[in-house]
Image: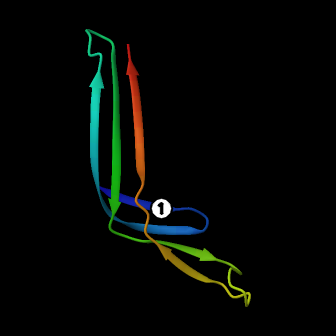
Amino acid sequence: MFGGTDTENENGVGASLFLDLGVEFCRLERDRFSAYLRVEVPTYTISTFDEGKYSNGSSGYTYSYRMPVGLHVNVGF
């Protein structure tokens, strides 16, 4: 999977891996309920440009690593 972040102040692009864990309940002929958790593990860092962040008024880039986690719930009928 290829992931990326590109907003006004944040940039980051690279490959990422993910893991899905899920369950389904009430699997009837047409009705069902499912939920799954997705964890993404990017192989890149996010660079953020912080203008005037420092006490002396200078600007600079800060780098952070983020691991997004999502919970998805579906109801079908």
Q: Position of residue 7 (x, y in %)?
A: 57, 62
Question: Residue 66: where, in percent of width, then height?
Answer: 44, 63
Q: Tell which residue pokes out farthest to the top in this image.
A: 29
In the foreground, 5 or 65: 65
| Front one among 5 and 40 | 40
Name the residue type under label 1: Thr
Query: What quarter of the picture does the C terminus occupy?
Result: top left
Q: Is residue 10 left or right of residue 2?
A: right
Q: Residue 24's x, y, as percent?
A: 28, 25
For mark 1, what is the residue?
Answer: 5
The answer to which image quadrant residue 42 occupies is: bottom left
Under circle 1, the secondary element is strand
Task: Give the quarter of the image for residue 59.
Answer: bottom right
Is 39 rendered above or below residue 10? above
- Colouring chosen for the image of the structure: rainbow
Residue 60 image position (x, y, % from top left): 60, 84
Q: Is residue 73 left or right of residue 27?
A: right
